[in-house]
Image: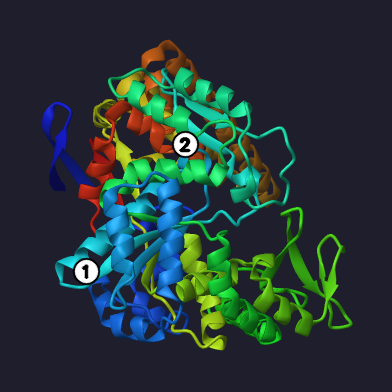
């Protein structure tokens, strides 16, 4: 177990960290676990794959040679938007550095979620920052950039956040403005008075600490009525990472759309080739035993159309080789779309398979940090890079954490548990706790009864088999019923024992809420405000210190 010295409000402290292989975590795809353990074996799908993050530096000459977007326009846009987000001076120093034609970017990104959404958003940013520092220590000019995916239009997906309340239970926060923003990019969603209620609920749920007042003041000022959802997200990200110099990029900016116009036009011209290649690649993945990625149909198109009402409409190919918007309000020829891309690029936004190509056209991207799903997408979208003549950017998995606070560590230790012991679910774990720690005598009686019944049933089975096989089959059915009923009674015994031990029941319920909320890894549900409320800005620094790019597993950090 690693020990990491850190600063805290009370002076110094030592974090402890250990690693768990993703192959030991349920629900991980074979493609992802293979990528983490043997990335070079997947070079067919990831031609730019590296075995170690230290090999990324070798790509810098290729990245610089292929970056043709105007850095002046790019950095002017970044400077303006980061001033709007109240960024720190270090961010503007990095934007100035990005103007240098020898500078590259380490990039990551995520949808703009309520109060930043799940914790993995935070871990993505820290991964990019840590990689930037690693490359700088070797003498390279590098900046970290966070792509805030404000073009995404699934507002329902980003409108929730979860914290642990004063009792340790999972509390859901939700905000939806009264105006209808369906199918509009999240960056165009404007907060209204309903956000006040959501913020009030957040701080009603959170326990009070020495850091609560400062956090509340900032949240109320940034997540305020009249502010845009994407801007509020960016301001909170800036508060968390501004001191590290993280640059926030909002792709809705018209200047960036114009810089991306050549990619849009080329993707339109080669759209049929892109569709064919994506379908073929999906088939290859399935044939090699991996799961299919983005489902590509014959009418698929790699760009969305942005209407006058800001609604984001999928474009679909018709049988007459024309293209219509999903709402059927507009129809175009391929030549018309290509011309519009050159003259009005703000009309378009890239689909998931094109987004990374646009990103790496705008930025001199040396590598990208993504999650498991994004790594899987890259196996398919790499074909889009090839068709559009772009070097394929290597993707690295973001750092992955479960944060275990002292009270939950005490519960784990008390019942001799590890994080991976929770993956079987609370019922299975409760059964073990009852039988090992709460009532061994009754548990032994159940085990003895089951053993004796099966011994006697085996005797009966041998006797019956000598003269009538149909009776043996009948006995087998009844044996299953007997064992089922004993198992059901045993389960009721477990529940009754837990009811008698209310303290234990609360400890286990709180443990699952904190470490496996909704039955998944903590980072997929919990929001950073819970930890910011308890530990202030120190929390981000702790996780930065615990970030280890050599570790391709899931890191478990004990506070």
Relative to residue 467, is residue 10 depicted above or below?
A: above
The answer to whether residue 291 is left or right of residue 217 is right
Res. 371 visible in picture? no
Kindly identify the residue that appears in the image at 48 percent across and 76 percent down. Answer: 361
The answer to whether residue 143 is left or right of residue 339 is left
**Nearest the camera: 298 or 469?**
298
Mark 2 or 1, which is nearer the eye? 1
Quarter occupied by the C terminus: top left
Local SS, label 2: helix
Labels 2 & 1 near each other (Cβ < 8 A): no
Q: Position of residue 384 (x, y in %)?
A: 56, 81
The answer to whether residue 494 is left or right of residue 160 is left
User: Disc 2 to disc 1, how far (Cα)?
Assistant: 36 Å
Local SS, label 1: helix
Relative to residue 448, is residue 108 depicted above or below?
A: below
The answer to whether residue 414 is left or right of residue 450 is left
Where does label 1 land, which residue?
A: 135
Q: Position of residue 20 (x, y in %)?
A: 30, 53
How was the colour assigned to the protein in this rendering? rainbow
Report crowding for label 1: few under 14, some 14 to 19, many 20 or more residues within 10 A (C-alpha): some
Q: Position of residue 103 (x, y in %)?
A: 29, 73
Res. 87 visible in picture? yes
Report crowding for label 2: few under 14, some 14 to 19, many 20 or more residues within 10 A (C-alpha): many
Q: Which mark is residue 517?
A: 2
Residue 173: name its quadrant: top right
**Nearest the camera: 438 or 66?**
66
Kindly identify the residue that appears in the image at 40 percent across and 45 percent down. Answer: 237
């Amino acid at each position: 177990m690693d020990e990491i010295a850190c600063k805290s409000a009370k002076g110094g402290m030592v974090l402890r960290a250990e690693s768990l292989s993703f192959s030991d975590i349920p629900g991980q795809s074979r493609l992802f676990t293979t990528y983490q353990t043997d990335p070079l074996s997947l070079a067919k799908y990831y031609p730019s794959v590296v075995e170690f993050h230290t090999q990324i530096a070798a790509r810098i000459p290729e990245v610089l040679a292929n970056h043709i977007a105007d850095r002046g326009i790019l950095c002017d846009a970044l400077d303006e938007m980061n001033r709007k987000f109240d960024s720190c001076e270090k961010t503007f120093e990095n934007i100035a550095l990005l103007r240098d034609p020898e500078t590259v970017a380490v990039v990551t990104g995520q949808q703009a979620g309520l109060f930043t959404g799940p914790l993995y958003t935070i871990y993505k940013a820290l991964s990019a920052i840590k990689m930037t520092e690693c490359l700088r220590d070797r003498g390279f000019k590098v900046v970290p950039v966070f792509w805030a995916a404000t073009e995404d239009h699934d507002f329902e997906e980003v409108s929730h956040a979860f914290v642990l309340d004063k009792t340790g239970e999972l509390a859901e926060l939700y905000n939806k403005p009264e105006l209808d923003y369906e199918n509009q990019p999240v960056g165009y969603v404007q907060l209204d008075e309903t956000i006040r209620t959501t913020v009030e609920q957040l701080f009603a749920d959170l326990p009070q600490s020495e850091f609560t007042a400062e956090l509340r003041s900032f949240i109320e000022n940034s997540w305020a009525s009249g502010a845009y959802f994407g801007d509020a997200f960016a301001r909170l990200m800036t508060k968390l990472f501004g001191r590290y110099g993280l640059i926030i990029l909002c792709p809705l900016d018209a200047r960036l759309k114009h810089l991306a116009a050549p990619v849009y036009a080329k993707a339109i011209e080669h759209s049929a080739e892109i569709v064919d290649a994506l379908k073929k690649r999906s088939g290859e993945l399935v044939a090699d035993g991996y799961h299919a990625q983005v489902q590509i149909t014959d009418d698929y198109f790699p760009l969305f159309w942005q209407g006058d009402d800001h609604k984001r409409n999928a474009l679909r190919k018709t049988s007459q080789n024309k293209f219509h918007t999903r709402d059927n309000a507009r129809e175009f020829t391929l030549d018309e779309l290509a011309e519009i891309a050159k003259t009005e690029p703000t009309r378009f936004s890239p689909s998931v398979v094109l987004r990374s190509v646009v990103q790496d056209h705008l930025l001199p991207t040396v590598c990208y940090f993504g999650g498991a799903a994004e790594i899987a997408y890259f196996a398919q979208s790499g074909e889009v890079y090839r068709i559009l003549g772009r070097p394929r950017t290597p993707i690295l998995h973001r750092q992955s954490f479960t944060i275990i606070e002292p009270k939950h560590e005490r519960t784990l230790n008390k019942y001799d548990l590890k994080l991976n012991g929770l993956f079987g679910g609370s019922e299975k774990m409760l059964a073990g706790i009852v039988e090992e720690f709460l009532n061994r005598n009754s548990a032994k009686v159940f085990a003895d009864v089951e053993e004796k019944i099966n011994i006697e049933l085996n005797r009966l089975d041998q006797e019956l088999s000598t003269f009538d096989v149909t009776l043996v089959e009948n006995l087998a059915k009844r044996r299953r019923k007997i064992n089922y009923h004993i198992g059901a009674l045993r389960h009721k015994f477990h529940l009754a024992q837990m009811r008698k031990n209310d303290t234990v029941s609360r400890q286990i319920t709180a443990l699952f809420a904190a470490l496996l909320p909704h039955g998944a890894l903590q980072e997929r549900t919990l929001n950073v405000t819970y930890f910011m409320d308890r530990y202030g800005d120190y929390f981000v620094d702790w996780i930065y210190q615990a970030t280890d790019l050599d570790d391709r597993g899931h890191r478990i950090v004990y506070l």
